[in-house]
Amino acid sequence: MSDYDDPEWADQLRANREEKDEFFAEHPQSPVQPGEREAFDGLDYFEPSTEYRVDAEVTVHDDPDPVEMETTNGPPVRYLRVATFAFDRRGEECELHAYRQEDDDSNTLFVPFRDKTTGQQSYEGGRYMEFEPDRALTDGDIVTLDFNLAYTPFCAFSETFACPLPPEENWLEVAVPAGEKTP
């Protein structure tokens, strides 16, 4: 059975959202300022939709190029472009690049992006996704990117955070109304 046919994915997504809202409202490391936590009643989200779970073809960059990303509050951060995800969105061919910091040995890939909702329905600095493959990726692999998991960086809530801004190569020319909305 594919993930698309799993009736529990939306329930799991909602449960994850509730857990995140609780963290933002109560945890000492929440990006929501302490004086604002009592009034915090949860993040705004787009409705879960399987339309925004897309199959993407992987291209692995064996000799990754460095990419300097500007940040919201501080010096640029250097990442390596380790993979590219190619997918179709309503007839539009799209690509998103996945990055990893040079000294990061984890499997987690960082996918910052902007789309046509940026600055309107979603945070003006862009949104992030993280992708954690269950094995080493190879060219031609097909993976599911779930934009329902797109989240707003902490810098949208507090200027004390310096968040990487999505590089222009990750600016999509389509709207992706999935994941978190503008805080």
Image (cartoon, rainbow, N blue to C red):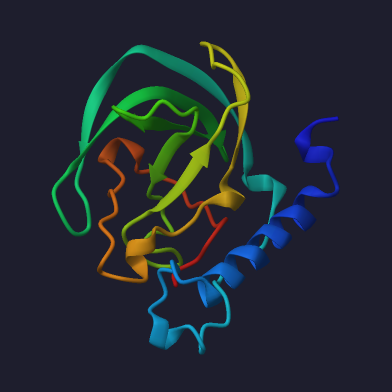
Residue in view at x 48 percent, y 27 percent: 85
Residue 94 vs 156, above or below: the answer is above
In the displayed structure, would residue 22 be above or below residue 131?
A: below
Residue 27 to residue 9: above or below: below
Q: Residue at x 30, y 28 (%)?
A: 103
Q: Quadrant of residue 44?
A: bottom right
For residue 70, side relative to residue 43 (left or right) = left
Single out the residue that lies furthest toward the front.
28
Within the image, what quadrant is residue 152 found in?
bottom left
User: Which quadrant of the view contains residue 89?
Assistant: top right
- Residue 159, compared with residue 64, is above or below; it is below
User: In the rendered view, does 139 fall on the left or right side of 49?
Assistant: left
Task: Tell me if residue 179 can be seen.
Answer: yes
The residue positioned 43% from the left and 86% from the top of the image is 36
The quadrant the C terminus occupies is bottom left
Q: Nearer the viewer, residue 179 or 163?
A: 163
Q: Position of residue 60 (x, y in %)?
A: 44, 15
Residue drawn at the location 36% of the way across and 54% of the way down:
126
Image coordinates for residue 163, horizontal then vertical, percent: 29, 54
- Measured from the top left, where is residue 141 in percent x and y? 59, 16
Count of numbered badges drawn on the protein: 0
Question: Is there any visible trace of residue 46 in the rendered image?
Answer: no
Taking the view exactly as shown, the residue that stands out farthest to the left is 75
Quadrant (top left/top right/bottom left/bottom right) for the N terminus: top right
